[in-house]
Amino acid sequence: MTATETPPVVVEPDANGNRIIGRPRVRREDPRLLSGEAKFTDDLDLPGALHLAVLRSPLAHARITSIDLSGALGLPGVVAAYTGEDLADLWATPMPCAWAVTEDMLNSPHYPIAIGKVCYVGDGVAAVLATSNEAARDALESIIVDYDPLPAVVDLEDALSDRVLVHEDLGTNTSYTWKLDVGLDEVEAAFASAAHVVKERYVQQRLIPMAMEPRAVAAVPQPFGGDITLYSATQIPHVLKVMTAITLGIPEQQLRVIAPSVGGGFGSKLDVYAEELLCTALAQKHRVAVRWVEERTENAQATIQGRGQIQDIELAADENGKLLAVRVNLLADMGGYLQLITPGIPLLGAFLYAGVYDLPLAYSFTCTGVYTTLTPTDAYRGAGRPEATYAIERAMDRLAVATGLDPVELRRRNFIQKEQFPYTAFTGLVYDSGDHDGALTKALAMVDYDGVRAEQAARRAAGSTRHLGIGISTYFEMCGLAPSRVLASLNYSAGGWESATVRVLPTNKVQVVTGASPHGQGHETSWSMIVAERLGVDPDDVDVLHSDTALAPLGMDTYGSRSLAVGGIAIYQAIDKVIDKARLIAAHILECDPLDLEFDLGTFSVRGTPSSQVPLAQVAFAAFTAHDLPDGLEPNLEAQVTYDPPNFSWPFGTHICVLDIDEETGAIDVVKFVAVDDCGNQINPTIVDGQVHGGVIQGLAQALFEEAIYDADGNPLTSTLADYLVPAACDVPPITTGHTITPSPTNPLGVKGIGEAGTIGSAPAVMNAVVDALSHLGVTEMAMPASPLRVWTAIEAARVAGGASPTAATPGGAS
Amino acid sequence: MIPAAFDYTVAESVDHAIALLGEHGDDAKLIAGGHSLLPLMKLRLATPAMLIDVDRLDELSFVRDGGDHIAIGARTRHHDVQNSLLLQTDVPILAHAAGQVGDPQVRHRGTIGGSIAHADPASDLPAVLLALGGSLVARGPSGDRVIDARDFFVGFLESALAPTEVLTEIRVPKVPGVGWSFQKFNRRAQDWAIVGVAAVHNNGSSGVGLVNMGSTPLFAAGVVEALRNGASAADAAAHADEGTEPQTDINATPEYRRHLVKVLVRRALEEAGA
């Protein structure tokens, strides 16, 4: 035996019989990402490529009266320049919106370069191709555009009034009205007779997803056969391939899409963008590679934004605080155009406005999507579900005040109980498993709830100007997008399945092909752990192929916390098939009945006769040589599975925030943040914690820091990282994570999702803590982000209004 | 984020830089760490035709004992100001404030001279210089002159430097053992202050500088005068917004800034022992 052949260390299995799954493991992706070895789209070396630059509208709303390209065309290095009209023939269809949420949804045609009219600051007005990025960008300054300015539409209620039409062809700014009503009579009756009614309005400010890698595209015509390869910093190479083929009228088989290393997306790269279509169309037209990379300021204007809703929520409760009915009216900001799934985003929250609570069949939800003259909105981490959770969890705190109950007690009285799972909700959706009280109880212990409430009371008694606030949120996430039949019922134009291939190579190394498309999640690590656990190989001997439609032709990509709960199960099932086939070969080798074989740690052995065994390596080689296979068996050891989930998965948890507010300045200092998240069984706890940390910070950023601000004319005021306040490492508090584990019964790994949970749970916990901290001063509401200016202004306003009212005092438990 | 085209020359010496400034006139800008100028150029808010690089003038990187003062070379980086034992002992407020500028990357590139010559009312170090009553050495075609810090900041992003002068040295009085405080109020650690206050106090003699309370870094004369007349820290702080012209931006209203500056001056004076 040589030094390189040290036997694998066999660790003792855990209670689930696992040796690799469920144990922390360092991400294999990180060394190359952190050392600069990984190639992002803009790192690709493409000799001779032309560089695209897009001239962007400086006005939010205007008619284009003339465009003079001549100044740009004469500049050194400039190869071509185009207006929207020049390019109109290149598009077989307008840009795609894949989610017509209602039969009568209004969608105005939207082209990669605007034709005749601009609808937001950042809308493309002209395109330049040049031999360098510098020459292309310089040339933009020599294009003369005359605009006839139109009034901006910035405010959602103003948009609803149709005072100014964003798209005259539609005749209204309302794109759609979507309803989900369950028991309207019961809703009316509940509100008429309820002991307690809470009626609140919350504003979800617009957020800029601000992935670390901006968008980048390169379209490369292949030297033979007319094919074209589209590289893009995208979350969705498979969807992008289909949509690009349709929009450009290119035969789909001639298009290959590759997502190289992708530096974050958070939903902003779950889209089909103008620059992807422009690069591809112009590469075809010029028969030369065309590339583009986004500037940070463009990213803040021309990449989709998240949230953007006004939420009216009403709760009816009985004298014990038990919920009787929920009524929700949303006004959702579509922005200037409908992007890929813009209209559906608020509806992903439609099922969650009753949160984790046991609601009778009395629920009324209406969402109206309106156009504004702002950057289009679309998916952003959580996509509809953080907004829903925010509204119900903030409103539950108001109900706690109204009923005089501690927010903890009120939640406990309303929880769906552990024994009720699987639970058929008022919507008809089945919640797979849950233990809300378990997560809450654990979080309360971790944060020392009684201790912090006592300190809060002591500070108030002492008249301190530093006010302690404690905020709780208990959440459900609907993830694992998605059962295709449910998507059909929502009129979504694609399925929710995922594909996987598992292939054991002749040398017993393993290739996994996945249709999920990672952009920071660590799929390679997690997938290798699942395969290694089940096939008894070393995780480092498992290669994971992804993000290239030629290598992985089938896939529905990565978003909606779906990769593990859908793509991971596809892998699990493909492994089953591989083992089943290997068993036939092993039985053939051992001359026994396949049913008598056990498979463990990579070896088949005859049950009761463990000395009679054959390792998978031998089976793999036998499959390769095919010298002596059972009759009719194909000579390979691979299997492909396309898995359509039977249900969403429903992770849940409790987040608790403790913060300190300086009354004199309005500054907020988060003292403790406890996140107890239950995502079912965990594959890699290191990745779970990383997802929770990042998610909590993104939610906390919405609560305290981030806001895409526009002036009344629709000019963005936060287009740089100096103005758009993404918190840095030193600006965020220590986060204490904890977990409960309630496996999902709907899949064999018992897993749920974790990618969005942190964001969903954290913002309402922070904002509940802000209001809690100031409640004794008479502050009852605070808008996001709770900037020092806003906090100070609210304290001053409460002071002028005469201080605390009796109903705004400390929550019941501590008063 | 690509600047407009510009020419670039490396200054071999301070005198060479002065000669280049004379040659190129208003089209030229000096560049050292580049952390104020380059962002403006990338946004094409500044489009100098010529950059004169003084970043390689190692002769301007020093912290020296000048007897009653400490002399700091204009090209000394914030990181080196922050970590100078001489400054930590004799002018601790300056070492501390230098450690509050931007983030570590900024502090390893940005220079004290660049920060002061940029004359940004939102920068930290000018206010510290005003509180300390420092002075600045400028070299021009006819030699050196010394400018009192309180005469240096003349308008928005405008200093008393002549077009052909180079800031070479910053002088700050030694104040060992003197009470001091630097209050920087911002939303993120890396940001410019929404409002900042630098205060030193010693036996009835005080200096207070204000960050982001007008178009220039400001000396809080009203506060200092009140303290001289025996006012308490709290009473003196009530004068903190006198003579200020705070602006509106996405983080603050003028009213909020006027309130904040009073709170922060009071806290600074209390911390400094006034």
Image: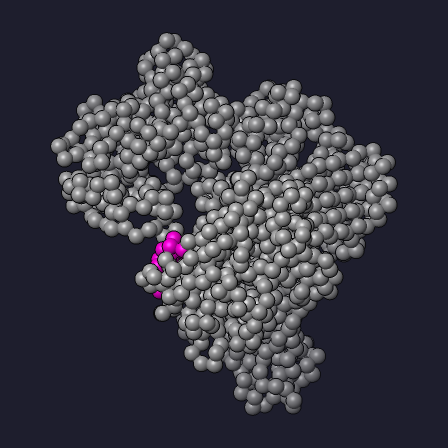
The spot of residue A743 in percent (x, y) is 69, 57
Look at 69% across and 83% down and name the residue there.
A593
State which quadrant residue B180 falls in: top left
Quadrant where the C terminus of chain B sits is top left
Question: Nearest the camera: A669 or A531?
Answer: A669
Specify the farthest residue to the left: B142
Counting the numbered discs, the total is: 0
Which is the main secondary structure of the residues drawn in magenta? helix
Instruction: Decide if residue A765 is on the left or right side of residue A57.
Output: right
A459 in relation to B49, above or below: above
Task: Determine the image quadrant of residue B211.
Answer: top left
Q: Is residue A136 magenta?
A: yes
Residue B248 picture location, percent across and down: 47, 31
Q: Quadrant of residue A288?
A: bottom left
- Which is more toward the observer, A377 or B85? A377
- Provide residue B95's location: percent of width, then percent of height: 32, 32
> Which of the two residues, A120 or A198, is positioned nearer the viewer here?
A120
Give the side of residue A185 with respect to residue A692, left or right. right
Segment colored magenta: A131-143
Give the vertical position of A249 relative to B121 (above or below): below
Which residue is depicted at the point 38% across and 16% down?
Answer: B222
Look at the image and tell me whether residue A31 can be seen: no
Say if the magenta span includes residue A747. no
Whole-percent x, y for residue A799 in the image: 61, 21
Q: Residue at x 62, y 20 (%)?
A: A800
> Does residue A788 appear to the left or right of A634 in the view shown?
left
Residue extending furthest top?
B229
Residue located 63% across and 67% down the image: A498
Answer whether residue B44 is visible to the viewer in this image: yes
